[in-house]
Amino acid sequence: MSVTCGTCGKISAEDARFCSGCGTRLDTTGDAPTEILVPVRVTEVPPYAGQAELVVTSGHRSGIRFELAGDRVTVGRHPDSDIFLDDITVSRRHVVLELGPAGHILIDVGSLNGTYVNGVRTDGEVRLSSGSELQIGKFKLLYLVSSVGL
């Protein structure tokens, strides 16, 4: 059996908690979100006008949302990271997300297990677009941009 996302229409597995297409919560028995984010392509909203967040879609912190506040956000296993992912598969200093005029740029800063964007390992900088799926260690995160803010 499957579940159809009410936001984007993508079909997901029955036990899925979030839509793999747009990140919308599929479990309606929990707390309702205060606002539904509408993913947009960065190229449709030049210059960068929205707020962005990362949503953990798999891993032991599944469902957690991290707002990408500021011009530089660090992600890693180091306790001083802006986004702390506590798992041995994540390097202490794994990636940096820098805000540019067209959105966020992901920079792998020498992680041991690498960083994947939409299933492709990155060796340098990658421009993220709304809906990009990141894999950092065993965590999968969905990058979402909202033109109306968070």
Image (cartoon, rainbow, N blue to C red):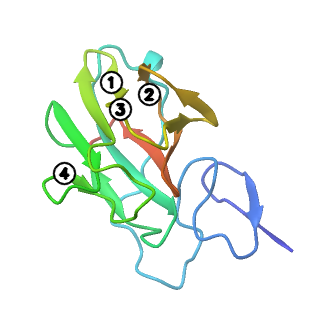
**Which one is earlier in the sequence, the residue at label 4 or at label 2?**
4
> Identity of the amino acid at label 3?
Gly
Is the residue marked by circle 2 packed among few (<14), some (14-19), or many (20+) residues within 10 Å? many
Seen in the picture, residue 86 relative to 28 is either above or below; the reply is above
Mark 4, residue position: 81
Mark 2, residue position: 128
| Labels 1 and 2 touching (C-beta < 8 A) | yes
**Which one is earlier in the sequence, the residue at label 3 or at label 1?**
1
Dot 4: element:
loop
Q: Residue at x 48, y 38 (%)?
A: 115
Q: Quadrant of residue 32?
A: bottom left
Seen in the picture, residue 149 relative to 62 is either above or below; the reply is above
Q: Residue at x 25, y 53 (%)?
A: 83
> Identity of the amino acid at label 2?
Leu
Mark 3, residue position: 110
Query: Can you give x and y, in whole percent of width and height, for residue 65 in the image?
Result: 35, 60
Report whether 31 appears left or right of 18: left
Mark 1, residue position: 103
> Identity of the amino acid at label 4?
Ser
Q: Residue at x 49, y 26 (%)?
A: 41
Q: Give the Cα distance between marks 1 and 4.
A: 20 Å
Query: Can you give x and y, in whole percent of width and height, for residue 138 in the image?
Result: 52, 57
Q: Nearer the viewer, mark 4 or mark 2?
A: 4
